[in-house]
Amino acid sequence: MAIPGDARPPRDCAPPPTPGAAFLLTQIGSHAAARFAERIAELDLTPPQTGLLRAVAVAPGQSQQALARLLGTPPSRLVALLDGLDERGLVERRRNPDDRRLHALHLTDAGHDLLRRIAEVGQAHDDAICAALSDEERTTLTALLARIAADHGLTPGVHPGYRHL
């Protein structure tokens, strides 16, 4: 029987389980995502805008519909994000020469400049999050995480959060 005010758990309580790899990935992922959002907020960007700029840069000239499929996001939500980036002069929509009903997406010079700044912020972020690891450990961790992501069918370089925008 526990004595009132006694901080000891009752004898029949099992110790809490040791956190597993999935919990640690979630814990670190949530922390990393929050810190990254803070870092890019200094560039007046959100994580979805940042990912969208990267996706346009990786495959310039793709249509809005193709980009929405790649990101797994509703086209209507993607249009709203693109409108904001277009208004800031970071992306431009050009008529697709093969199908004039579609717009081909491209980064502007300002978009390319901002993407270089994002890369610098991203590298500093990666360095800060992985500071406890040696270069070799970091390489191993990256390879293992990429293998897990591939096993779960995650699109390389695309955050699964786009599906929930």
Image (cartoon, rainbow, N blue to C red):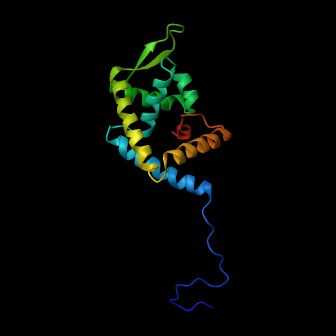
Identity of the residue furthest to the top in this view:
97
As displayed, is residue 53 above or below residue 40?
above
Mark count:
0
> How far across and how far down the image is residue 13, in percent?
65, 79
Q: Residue at x 53, y 41 (%)?
A: 161
Q: Quadrant of residue 151?
A: top right
79 or 61: nearer the viewer? 61
> In the image shown, does 120 or 157 lie closer to the viewer?
120
The residue located at (53%, 28%) in the rendering is 75
Q: Residue at x 37, y 40 (%)?
A: 40
Q: Position of residue 45 (x, y in %)?
A: 37, 37
* Vertical relation: 138 (above or below) 84: below
13 left or right of 41? Answer: right
Determine whether 54 is above or below 7 in the image: above
The one nearer the camera, 99 or 3, is 3
Q: Quadrant of residue 164?
A: top right
Residue 20 placement (x, y as % from top left): 62, 59
> Is residue 164 toward the left or the right of residue 12 in the image?
left
Q: Position of residue 129 (x, y in %)?
A: 45, 49
Q: Residue at x 59, y 41 (%)?
A: 143
Which quarter of the rendered picture does the N terminus lie within? Answer: bottom right
Residue 96 horizontal side relative to residue 150, left or right: left
Q: Is residue 56 left or right of residue 152?
A: left
Image: 111 above or below 40: above
